[in-house]
């Protein structure tokens, strides 16, 4: 079915004669067959957002509807790949058309020529339901790709093949209850705006280990949780996302570069292939899907890129994997919504954003979670959604930040003053929060005992007290403080510099295991306890600040993780002896 263009306004095209088309249908626009999607219908007139540059289009050009919603192709070949916002593979587009993306280029999302070694799991005669595993493909050395029965198909396996096949070859035949045969391939298609089904959703109860101490100890996120990373320009949003992608203990990472500057995405594309996965030593790209939709690419495709990424993540979740979706940034995605809303002449909301901004953000974040997957076996998987927010001028009172805060349960607020002071990660410990502390407390207690969370609470209390004491110091100077308060200031400084601050360029400090984090924090707080005991005996505080063990505590985070417990024991013993000597010397005087 075809229609005719009556109006072109940037990425928005209005066409008439499409009475039988539906909202969300994909259409081909003009002579070059540009890809577009119907946003709304009024009679036979359709408003279409075009995912490619529309210069040269004019009234009278033809629009052809495909009758299909915007969908992604799911199957072997997605890992170790780079897509644009509508799942077109950039390496294959470059091979076909050169360095510049040609308008109207049509390249399949999954390579139709690559052959994959399919190993069947199901046997003829088996009864299968949606989600059951038919067989496996070793897609990369890091990930075993499970070929599942698609949604809507169930019955008895008539035949299943073994060997090397392309994604379009028939690998199994399933006969349903009505006697109809269904030819199954290794590829599925799924509409990006509809969440993939599951049996049930759980309350997230396991933390996602990011290796970043301020995240894991102070403001943890659960696997299957949601988090936002807001911050002004230059505060390190992209760096935090990169660290999460490198070190998080998830099986698969889907990184969405949504509307950020091209040079930042270039850094990702250049850096990730060279990085090794710390868990198995393989290249990190072997468990990563990159979606690149930079600020110089068509604005409408940003809106689709978020849904493309979360749908790919849900597919791997359905195999029983833990997946992290990193969106950088949802502010640029919201700006794309605002531009399209303005061109549609919709009533604007606050700061020109559409009135449905909050509901669209919720639709994205609510697709995260821990679920019991479809299928006869008991599989569970998770999708963790982490979105960067780029508020203009760092003002988090703007609509995107506020709408995000109402949805997510973890808020890592980046602070430009910390970034300028070279304190990274530049997460402000006074304005950030995590609502998963209560649900994760039992896990921490089971692994490390009651002391882990008690130390976390004590450290936060010290940082809060430091913030209050700084007001006094600004007015009357540090000499006006009591010895106990001066010790609080010193301990808070140790928590900030020796624990929270990390150096991504030092291998020993770029990543911290939970055990190392627990020992580091315990060392700092034990120093505080011993010094407070010494103060009760009239000891000179300045002498306690300059003991050699004090410097060794600061250097402990750079120590070899394998020998960390021995180093901790040595420093702790030395610290106790030196403080005892200072106390004894004071008593003699």
Image: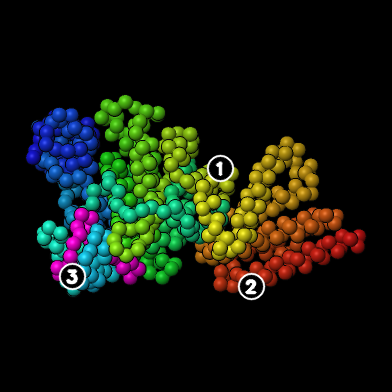
Range of magenta residues:
140-160
User: Mark 1 or mark 3, which has the lower sequence index?
Assistant: 3
Q: Is residue 479 above or below residue 60?
A: below
Q: Secondary structure at mark 3?
A: loop
Magenta stretch containing residue 216, yes or no?
A: no
Taking the spot 11% from the left edge, 36% from the top edge, the residue there is 20
Q: Nearer the viewer, mark 2 or mark 3?
A: 3
The Cα–Cα distance between marks 1 and 3, rounded to whole angstroms, is: 59 Å
Q: Is residue 554 visible?
A: no
The dot on residue 125 is 3
The first of marks 2 and 3 along the sequence is 3
**What is the crowding at mark 1: few (fewer than 14 residues within 10 Å), some, or many (at least 20)?**
few
Residue 317 in percent (x, y) is at 34, 58
Relative horizontal placement of residue 537, taking residue 368 as reference (left or right): right
Seen from the viewer's position, the closer of residues 490 and 116 is 116
Q: Secondary structure at mark 2?
A: helix
């Amino acid at each position: 079915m075809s229609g005719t263009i009556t109006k072109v306004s940037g990425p928005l095209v209005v066409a008439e004669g499409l009475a039988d088309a539906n909202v969300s249908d994909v259409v081909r626009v003009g002579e070059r067959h540009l890809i577009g999607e119907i946003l709304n219908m009024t009679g036979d007139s359709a408003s279409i957002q075009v995912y490619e540059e529309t210069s040269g289009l004019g009234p009278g050009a033809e629009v052809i509807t495909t009758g299909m919603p915007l969908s992604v192709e799911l199957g072997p070949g997605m890992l170790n790949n780079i897509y644009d916002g509508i799942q077109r593979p950039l390496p294959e587009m470059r091979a076909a058309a050169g360095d510049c993306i040609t308008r109207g280029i049509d390249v399949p999302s999954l390579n139709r020529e690559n052959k994959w070694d399919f190993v069947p799991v199901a046997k003829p005669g088996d009864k299968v339901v949606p989600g059951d595993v038919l067989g496996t493909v070793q897609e990369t050395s890091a990930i075993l790709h499970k070929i599942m029965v698609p949604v809507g198909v169930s019955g008895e396996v008539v035949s299943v093949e073994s060997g090397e096949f392309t994604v379009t070859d028939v690998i199994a035949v399933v006969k349903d209850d009505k006697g109809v045969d269904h030819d199954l391939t290794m590829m599925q298609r799924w509409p990006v705006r509809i969440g993939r089904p599951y049996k049930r959703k759980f309350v997230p109860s396991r933390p996602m280990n990011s290796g970043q101490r301020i995240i894991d100890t102070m403001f943890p996120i659960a696997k299957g949780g949601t988090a936002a990373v807001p911050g002004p320009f230059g505060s390190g949003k992209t760096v935090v996302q990169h660290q999460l992608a490198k070190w998080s203990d998830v099986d698969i990472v889907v990184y969405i570069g949504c509307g950020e500057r091209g040079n930042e995405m270039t850094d990702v594309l250049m850096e990730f292939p060279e990085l090794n996965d710390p868990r198995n030593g393989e290249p990190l790209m072997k468990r990563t899907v990159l979606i690149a939709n930079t600020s110089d690419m068509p604005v409408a495709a940003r809106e689709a890129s978020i849904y493309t990424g979360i749908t790919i993540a849900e597919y791997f979740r359905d195999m029983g994997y833990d997946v992290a979706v990193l969106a950088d940034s949802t502010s640029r995605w919201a700006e794309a919504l605002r531009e399209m809303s303005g061109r549609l002449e919709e009533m604007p909301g606050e700061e020109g954003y559409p009135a449905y901004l909050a509901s669209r953000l919720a639709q994205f974040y609510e697709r995260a979670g821990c679920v019991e997957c479809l299928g006869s076996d008991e599989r569970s998987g998770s999708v963790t959604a982490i979105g960067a927010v780029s508020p203009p001028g760092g003002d988090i009172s703007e609509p995107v930040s506020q709408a995000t805060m109402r949805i997510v349960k973890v808020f890592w607020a980046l602070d430009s003053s910390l970034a300028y002071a070279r304190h990274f990660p530049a997460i402000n410990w006074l304005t950030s929060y995590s609502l998963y502390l209560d649900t994760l407390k039992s896990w921490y207690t089971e692994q490390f005992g009651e002391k882990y969370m008690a130390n976390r609470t004590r450290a936060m209390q010290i940082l809060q007290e430091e913030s209050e004491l700084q007001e006094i110091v600004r007015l009357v100077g540090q000499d006006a403080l009591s010895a106990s308060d001066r010790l609080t200031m010193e301990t808070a400084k140790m928590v900030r510099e020796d624990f929270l601050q990390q150096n991504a360029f030092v291998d020993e400090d770029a990543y911290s295991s939970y055990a190392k984090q627990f020992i580091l924090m315990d060392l700092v707080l034990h120093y505080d306890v011993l010094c407070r005991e010494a103060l009760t005996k009239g000891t000179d505080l300045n002498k306690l600040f300059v003991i050699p063990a004090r410097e060794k505590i600061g250097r402990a985070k750079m120590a070899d993780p394998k020998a960390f417990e021995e180093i901790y024991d040595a420093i702790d013993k030395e610290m106790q002896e030196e403080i005892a000597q200072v106390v004894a010397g004071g008593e003699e005087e």
